[in-house]
Amino acid sequence: MEKNIQDELKTLLLKEKVELEENLTRIARPIDKERGDYETSFGEIGTDREDNTTEVEQYTDNLPIEITLEKNLQDVISALERIEKGTYGFCENCQKEIDIERLRANPSAKTCIKC
C-alpha cells in the first residue's frame, strides 16, 4: 500500500476514534481507554420509584448503544495497531490485500470482500 493512501486511511481512523470516544463518554465511563473498554453509566436522578425507573430506562437504552460504539472503537484501535505493525490492509483470513475502496469505506475492515 502506498504511504500516502495509508496516511489518508490512518487520518480517517484517528478521526473516527475521537468521534467514538466522544460519543461513548456521553453515556459511559472509560475503564481502559487504550483498549476501548467502557462501562455504561447513568446519572442518579433521585431516590423515589419514578426516578429509579427513569435511571433503569436510561441504562437499558444506553447499554446496546455503548456495546456497539465500544466494538467499533475496538476495531479502530485494532486497525491503528495493524498500521504500526505493518499488517494493515491485508485480509485476516486469506492474507490477500484488501481493496482500497473497501478500506476507504470502512478503514477498520479486517477482511476482504470475499472473506
Image (tube, rainbow, N blue to C red):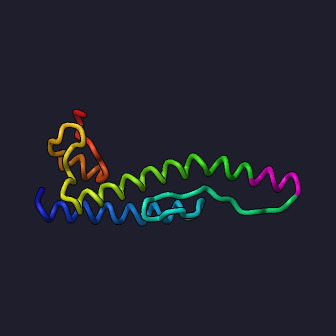
Instruction: Compare residues 84 and 50 and report the one nearer the observer.
Output: 84
Give the left or right position of residue 96, taking residue 31 as reference.
Answer: left
Q: Quadrant of residue 20?
A: bottom left
Q: Residue at 18% x, 45% y: name it.
A: 99
Give the left or right position of residue 56, taking residue 34 as reference.
Answer: right
In the picture shown, does residue 70 fall above or below 113?
below
What x and y, as percent, mark residue 112?
Answer: 22, 40
What x and y, as percent, mark residue 70?
Answer: 48, 53
Q: Residue at 23% x, 38% y: name it.
A: 93
Please identify the quadrant where the C terminus is shown: top left
Please identify the quadrant where the N terminus is shown: bottom left
**Chain part drawn in magenta:** 48-55
Q: Residue at 15% x, 41% y: name it.
A: 96
Q: Is residue 54 magenta?
A: yes
What x and y, as percent, mark residue 81?
Answer: 29, 59
Residue extending furthest top? 114
Residue extending furthest left? 2
Q: Quadrant of residue 14?
A: bottom left
Q: Residue at 71% x, 63% y: name it.
A: 43
- Main secondary structure of the magenta stretch: helix
What x and y, as percent, mark residue 88?
Answer: 22, 54
In the picture shown, does residue 72 fall above or below 93?
below
Counting every numbered tag in the picture gives 0
Q: Is residue 33 magenta?
A: no
